Image (spheres, grey):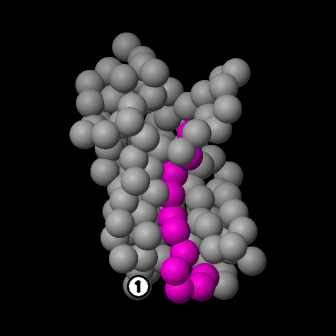
Amino acid sequence: QVQLVESGGGLVQPGGSLRLSCAASGRLFSGNVMGWYRQAPGKQRELVASITMGGNTNYADSVKGRFTISRDNAKNTVSLQMNSLKPEDTAVYYCNVYQGAYYWGQGTQVTVSS
């Protein structure tokens, strides 16, 4: 089992920045992929960004150039630096680990509004 705890969500004005963090505990295997997903009201959950243990990253087109994902393998943490935030980035953001099965955090609300 893997437990994930997110932090860092909140309310920010358009153009602002937020940093999300996630700490993983439990049984983590080598080769896992960590990532962030988001779900806006009335929409399906979508991948925002993911990162392998080797540092290979993948981003949704809508966040490329604005968001940066990083991880610390020694601490089992993953972070998402979000810059130039837009109202359409408003969603609940979920931390995720994939290692043969998906594990999810409880989610953290990000609201971009003036």
The residue drawn where x is 36% and y is 59% is 57
Residue 7 shows up from this direction: no
Residue 52's place in the image compared with 96, above or below, is: below
Q: Is residue 29 magenta?
A: yes
In the image, residue 74 lies at what x, y percent?
40, 85
Q: Nearer the viewer, residue 103 or 21?
A: 103
Q: Is residue 24 left or right of 49 when viewed as pictured?
A: right
In the image, residue 109 lies at what x, y percent?
56, 37
In the image, residue 21 lies at what x, y percent?
44, 58
Secondary-structure class at tag 1 = loop
Q: Is residue 114 left or right of 107 when viewed as pictured?
A: left
Q: In the rendered structure, which segment of residues is drawn in magenta?
A: 28-38
Q: Nearer the viewer, residue 60 or 80?
A: 60
Q: Nearer the viewer, residue 40 or 10?
A: 40
Q: Quadrant of residue 56?
A: bottom left
Q: Is residue 86 magenta?
A: no
Of all residues shown, which one is farthest toward the top?
114
The residue singled out by tag 1 in the image is: 74
Q: Quadrant of residue 72?
A: bottom left
Q: Is residue 36 left or right of 100 when viewed as pictured?
A: left
The residue drawn where x is 59% and y is 85% is 29
Residue 103 shows up from this direction: yes
| Type of amino acid at the residue the image marks with label 1 | Ala
The residue drawn where x is 66% and y is 84% is 27
